[in-house]
Image: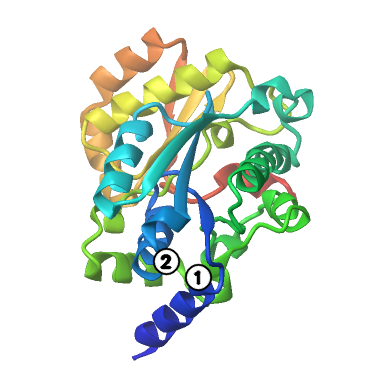
Amino acid sequence: MIFDRKLERLKRIISAYKSVIVAFSGGQDSAFLLKICALVLPLDKILAVTAVSATYPQAELAKAKILAKHIGVRLKIIRTGELNNKKFTANSTARCYFCKQELFSKLIIMAKQKKIDFVLEASSLSDKLDYRPGNIAKQELKIKSPLIEAGFSKEDIRRLSKKLGLSSWNKPSLACLASRIPYGVKITSSLLKRIDQAEAYLSSLGFRQLRLRHHNNLCRIEVDKSDICRLLNKRERIIKRLKDLGYNYITVDLEGYRTGSLNEVINK
């Protein structure tokens, strides 16, 4: 079976690393990668690291802790300072590069201090379909991407995560909160907090895969197409909450949720 062959290849790749730091957001991809590391390497040779900042959804930290504990791997929480970098907060189309440079640089330093051989991250082949300037930072710092090397797509990860009993197998896609802000609009901690609070509220109403895209005093809500009617049925309470958070106009994107929708303007 093709999935079995891919999994065996992934295990061979990881076993050759000997000791690893795994950049662990708590999302579906990084949870799967961490699980395979735990199956292949001694647990004392694995360290999961979750980076916390204003760009990381607040509710995700508790979930990441639970997942790491379930997998049985040590977890270290660090704080990153991308908001101290004016090149990041200026929010050019290279924003993701500066964010990943900050994260991976810290992980490389940690790996050297702890005498750990490699730093791993959990991009898959599916991520190559979107605009990802952070990949440049990954290449510069020689971060390993074993899921890409072994030929894994997001669908592969989802199916094998379910087979392995990972609770994250059907977890909605995660992304940095800065990805909700159009290029050229300055990124601030207060703006990120507003977006996080808005998405947390929508999530509390039962919407799983969602994004709230910020457009000054207007917000554009993306949910799965199948959830748009349900969203509209809750519009009165949604309008009230999002206006309380400072939005004057509340809109729904009729195309529904899609990865990197703010990147659609780059080549236009």
| Pointer 2 or 1: first along the chain | 1
Position above or below: 149 against 213: below
Residue shown at 48% from the left, 25% from the top: 219
Q: Residue furthest bottom?
A: 1
Q: Nearer the viewer, mark 2 or mark 1?
A: 2
- The x and y percentages for residue 150 are 52, 77
Between 259 and 60, the one lying in front of the other is 60
Circle 1 sits in a helix, a strand or a loop, which is it? helix
Q: Amino acid at mark 2?
A: Leu
Label of residue 41 in the image: 2
Circle 2 sits in a helix, a strand or a loop, which is it? loop
Position above or below: 189 against 15: above
Q: Is residue 198 left or right of residue 10?
A: left
- The x and y percentages for residue 182 are 64, 32
Between 203 and 96, the one lying in front of the other is 96
Residue shown at 36% from the left, 62% from the top: 38
Between 35 and 85, the one lying in front of the other is 35
The answer to whether the residue labelled 2 contacts the one labelled 1, judged by CB atoms less than 8 Å apart, is yes
Q: Is residue 107 left or right of residue 44?
A: right
Position above or below: 72 against 66: below
Residue 36, by quadrant, is bottom left
Residue shown at 66% from the left, 23% from the top: 83
Mark yes or no: residue 117 visible: yes
Q: Amino acid at mark 1?
A: Ile
Residue shown at 39% from the left, 63% from the top: 42
State how many labels appear.
2
Q: Is residue 145 left or right of residue 161?
A: right
Residue 238, by quadrant, is top left
- The x and y percentages for residue 215 are 57, 25
Determine which residue is flagged by label 1. 14
